[in-house]
Amino acid sequence: MIQFKDIAFEVKRIAAKRISRLRHIINVRKGHFTVYVGEDAEETKRFVVPISYLKHPLFQALLHQAEDEFGTDHKRKSLTIPCPHHVFLDVTSRLNR
């Protein structure tokens, strides 16, 4: 027989799991989104960038590179751009001018 304590524990476990999945969304200002940048999983860094970058041709080129390398269906559920950090920072600094 299932007891209330068992159900409560399971609900807490499921809630904690879902919250951890959403952790990458937390602390992102309105009008921005997160991007993970790096050539491999160990070097990946998280960046928060303005949504307006999506319209810029340089940023779109990075997105096309990500699509070519990863496709549109991969394990990571977040936007990942497979390039060196310095390249990403160079491109975004040009977008800020």
Image (spheres, rainbow, N blue to C red):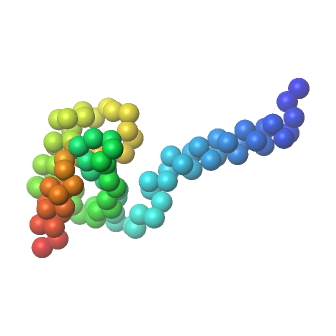
Residue 5 vs 85, above or below: the answer is above
Picture coordinates of residue 70 (x, y %)?
A: 25, 34
Does the image show residue 37?
Answer: yes
Closer to us: 71 or 30: 71
The residue drawn where x is 17% and y is 58% is: 86
The image quadrant that residue 13 belongs to is top right
Q: Quadrant of the N terminus?
A: top right
Above-or-below relation of 13 to 93? above
Residue 96: x %, y % from top left: 17, 71
Observer able to see residue 56: no
Q: How many marks?
A: 0
Rendered view: 66 above or below 46: above
Quadrant in the picture for the C terminus: bottom left
* x, y percent for residue 4: 85, 39
Residue furthest bottom in the image: 97
Q: Residue furthest top?
A: 1
Residue 73 located left or right of residue 67:
right
From the top left corner, tell me how far across and down residue 29 is, in percent.
40, 67
Residue at point 33%, 61% (across, down) = 48
